[in-house]
Image (cartoon, rainbow, N blue to C red):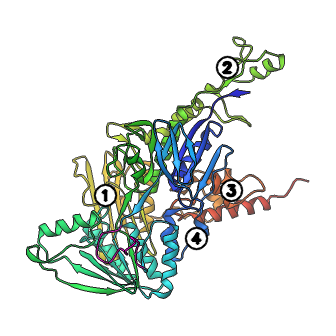
Amino acid sequence: MNLRVPVKVVVVGFGMVGSRLVDELLRREPEAFDITVLGSEPYEPYNRVLLSDVVAGRTDVAAITMPLPDGARVSVRRGVTATSIDRESRVVHADDGTVHPYDHVVLATGAAARVPPIPGLRTPDGGLPAGVHTLRNLDDAREIVAATVNSPRAVVVGGGVLGLEAAVGLAGRGLNVTLVHHSEGLMERQLVPEAADVVRAGLEGQGVTVRQNSISSEVLVAGGRAVGIRVRDSAGVTAGAAASAAAGAVAGVGGVSMGGSAGRAVRDEVVAARLIVFSVGTIPETGLAAAAGLTTDRGVVVGYDLASPDDPRVHAIGDCAQPPSGSRGLVAEGWDQARRLAEHLVSLVEPVTPVPAVATPAARVGASAGVAGVGTPGDPAGTRPTAHLRLPHDCAQPSMAVRLGALLTSGATTSRAQTDRGIDTRGTDVVKIKAGPLSVTTMGVCGPSRPDELTQRAIRLADPRAGRFIEVVVSDGILVGATCVGDPRVAADLTAAYTRRTPAPLDPAFLLLTPVMAAAAPASSPEHMPEDAVVCRCNGVTKGDIAGACPPGAHSVEEVVRETRATTGCGSCKDAVCGLVDWLRASEEAIPEPA
């Protein structure tokens, strides 16, 4: 018998990052924590990344749900919102009147959709008019899908990642879609102007009308329902006014006056639409942290250890957090933070100390089969703590020392080591747009704001007539950034090279194209795939991981998802995972039973 008081952890937020933290803790030390989860939404955790797929009709709502945490020491309270944190008493108060004590509290409250303060966008009670939506949660997606039935025209405001996906999804449903963006180029954070032009051409090829360098100045409402939006073209303003307009749009200001000395708008027109979707950024949910006296800026300020500088027992991860390196709002970044915080919390857990017992011959025989130095002749009673070098057995997980040793020998920890620039998060900043046949992928050093360092070498291939733009950035023989538009095969190769840190060719130009010479044909069957072939890049799941997650006689996609997390990221690997599971099932059935 082992005596250890479980550590009380309260997780505020049950989204993709909060649920991942719970899973990370359970995979490491399921008996070490008493976990309480407070989720304001009444639903099971779901994949927010796939909401645009729901809008497009490519995915059903039921298909984006994620597995619930499975643990005797986990209490999930859905539809319950945390209202305050009493740091002195170390308790969290909820809106249902319950009080939850904690040793550590983790804020994973995410971010809310930004709603610009433009005329007509707010009703007297502070809500949105009928027909106007944001796309941030499951209810938003359902309402947008329902609105498409009676809305032949739609306007999407915001040409970022989510705005592009929403516009293409609505166009795929047969709507006449206009995309309004304040900047001169789409996805201006990730794409240089030449790449943005290729993306624009690809959108127009799918029936989306793109209005760049335009600002929405008013939502037109009739009878409580949106009927259109007024759009002003800012191409004719002065440089100073254009900068102010861009800054206003980034800050959430959807409309800028073009009168007077600021200049004159080239066009001021009304775009008729009964469905308007705003995708102009997010605002981190910091109210709970600020009310508790914690430092907040754009998000909840945390250090490299993801703890608040004001209280080491309060942590923040995901979209609500503001680490020293900043936040890009990508789910892979939040998942990496969840993993790192889980490792940190596990490291704080006291080792399991066995209750002293009188040695018996059986006990000594059992101890002699263990680790040297634990229950050995020097310690015949086996009274020393056994957790320090607890090896994996049928009924026990390996101890932290053993797991860290395995990580160090495999080099797995080097990808997230702390450097003089903070935590290396390479691989968590890959952006992949789900826009039908249009392929857009960026990673690492990219976009117009990338630093121009002497050690970096940038090579690009611009082929706008073919709908293709590729740029790679190499430093010290390693790919440190890339932009790929219009070539999904090259994008897949670049993503693999970037995340694996494989050495770049001596001539980086070879990275811009798929091999011209004859190469090995793709595997015609999973049987020919190597065991280390990556199937799910979001979670680093290989063919071998999937095969190991399917015990004999129990081949199901649900089990694979639960054990490996495959398909819970961008969802693009779902068909491959299903096919691999079907192959494993068929392979087992083809093996004759012994006589």
Residue 287 x %, y % = 40, 52
Question: Label 4 crowding class (10 Å Cα cut-off): few <14, some 14-19, many 20+?
Answer: some
**Residue located beneath label 2 in the image:** 372
Q: Nearer the viewer, residue 285 or 337?
A: 285
* Left or right, 382 with reference to 192: right
Residue lying farthest top? 378
Residue 243 x %, y % = 17, 65
Counting residues from the start of the chain, the first of labels 4 and 1 encountered is: 4
Picture quadrant where residue 235 is located:
bottom left
> Residue 446: which disc?
1
**Residue located beneath label 3 in the image:** 559
Q: Quadrant of the N terminus?
A: top right
Residue 325 x %, y % = 34, 46
Counting residues from the start of the chain, the first of labels 2 and 4 encountered is: 4
Check if mark 2's residue and mark 4's residue have beta carbons within 8 Å. no
Amino acid under label 2? Ala
Check if mark 3's residue and mark 4's residue have beta carbons within 8 Å. no
Query: Secondary structure under badge 2?
Result: loop
Q: Nearer the viewer, mark 3 or mark 2?
A: 3
Query: Secondary structure under badge 1?
Result: loop
Instruction: Residue at 21% x, 84% y: name it.
Output: 268
Question: Label 1 crowding class (10 Å Cα cut-off): few <14, some 14-19, many 20+?
Answer: many
Q: Report the predominant secondary structure element of the magenta stretch.
A: loop
Amino acid under label 3? Glu
Amino acid under label 1? Cys
Q: CA distance from mark 4 to mark 1?
A: 33 Å
